[in-house]
Structure formats: structure tokens, C-alpha cells
Amino acid sequence: MKEISRIAVVLGVICTLTVISCKKEDKEPAPVPTPSATLGSPFQTYSYFRTGYSVTETNSVINVDSSLVYAMFYDQPTYPNNKIPAGNVSINTLSLTPDQSNFYQYLFFSSPINISNTLYWNVTGAGTITAFTHSYVPSYPRYSGADLLPDTCVKANGLSVSIAGVSNRSGLIPGLSISVYQYSPTYVQINKSIQTSSGTVSFSASELAGFDTSESFYLLVSINNYTSVNVSNVFRAFSCDYQYTKEIYFK
């Protein structure tokens, strides 16, 4: 249970990643042969693939897109670990672009992607990451409880978040994380998780101490259907996600 909670929090942290620049590696080492022994475990994987739907609510305006498509590859299966290059990475023949930290993301701005049908991942490999392919039919969680999320917050009273309306949770780790974060004047973020599909998550006044009341902040509900698959003797993680972000104002 401790391992599951740790992974759920890590997934919540990952959900707020933003890629602002991309640079392709000039040279990549040659792939190595597929190892004969299985590497990693269902809870400790060497790569992570994510697709999902993102909903953002700001000033009562709701925007929906299917922009959550990215992949990461690690030098070791334990956290924290270093991201490493994996050659060319694509989903349904559409290429993902790596940034300087080897974070692979599909740049959806010019061509939207359908992530509801069968997904085909292809990795050419580099260094210790061997080439592999994997396909599956995604199963995304559903969320209909956004009306319960708060609109405002009195900092001295803390923040109470009611979670309900979550369905279709599945996978090895059906994670549910709740985060609050603020961009300015300095970036601050607090992450929590629950193992059930409903409940109340509280952020105390002391936990919100680093938030500036002159600026709004964001509440993120992230639901992850996380599973792990043995592909070519290496455990790979695949996550089908739904996240809802709401802007909240201090009173």
C-alpha cells in the first residue's frame, strides 16, 4: 500500500509538467541486445507512457482537449531516476518530440490526435533502451463531480475538496490525486492522493501558507488507470488518464 500511495503521488506530480522547448539529440548510442532476464517489476518500470483527456475550467469557461500524450524512459526503475533518450518514439505513427531533459511529448497543436481507439506505440531504442512496440485499447476513467469543486477559498480556513462522480477506474493502480498549485509570484505545489473513488481531501491553512492571496491558484483532480506490461523482458508502465483543472480565487 505504501508503494501504491507513492506511485499515485508521483503520477499527480507528473500531471503538471509543461514542455516549453524541444531539442533533438545530435547523436544517440547504438541499441544494446534485449536482456535475457526480466528487468523491473510491475511497480518498478523502466519507461512510462501516458495518454489522457484534460479539462480546464477558468472563469466558468470549460475547455476540453485530448492533449495528454507523452513518454519517459529511465536509467533505473526506482524513483527518483534520470530520464534517458530512447531514439524515435511514436504513437499511431505520429512522432513525439523530446526536450533537453528527454521528456517525449506529442506536439498536438498542428494535428489533433484520437486517443480513444487502439494505441500503437513504437520505440526505436537508444543506449540501454531496446527497441520495442506495444499496442492496446485504452480504458479511461470518468469524472462527473466537477460541480462539487470549490470556487473560492478563505486561506485562514484552509481548503476542503469533495471528490465524487469517479467511475471506470481500472488497472494495476487506479490512482486518484488532488493537487493545488500557484504560478506566481513563485511556483508552489501541494499533492495528495486517495485510494477510493470518493471522499474529502483537505489542505490546511498552514499547508497553504506559501500561496499569495492576491493571485488565483489551481486545483487539479487527476485520475489514473495505471498498468504495467512485460514487453520484451522489461516492465513498461502505461497510464490512461483524466484530469480536471479548476481555477480558484481567494476571498
Image (cartoon, grey):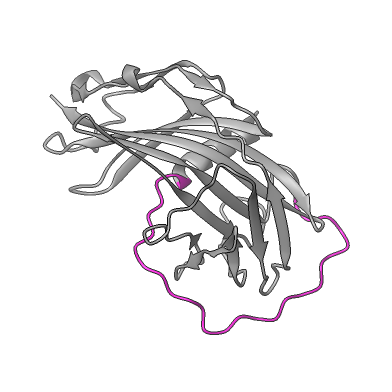
Residue 99 shown left or right of residue 167 in the figure: left
- How many numbered marks does the figure carry? 0
Residue 78 shown left or right of residue 178 in the figure: right
- Where does the image place residue 88, in percent across and percent down from the top left? 60, 71
Q: Considering the image in quadrants, where does the N terminus appear?
A: top right
- Where does the image place residue 13, in percent across and percent down from the top left? 45, 44
Between residue 250 and residue 134, name the one nearer to us: 134
Q: Vertically, is 108 above or below 58? A: below
Q: Which residues are magenta?
A: 14-40
Residue 112 shown left or right of residue 167 in the figure: left
- Where does the image place residue 36, in percent across and percent down from the top left? 88, 63
| Residue 192, quarter of picture | top left
Q: Is residue 22 magenta?
A: yes
Q: Residue at x 45, y 68 (%)?
A: 99
| Residue 201, quarter of picture | top left
Q: Is residue 204 magenta?
A: no
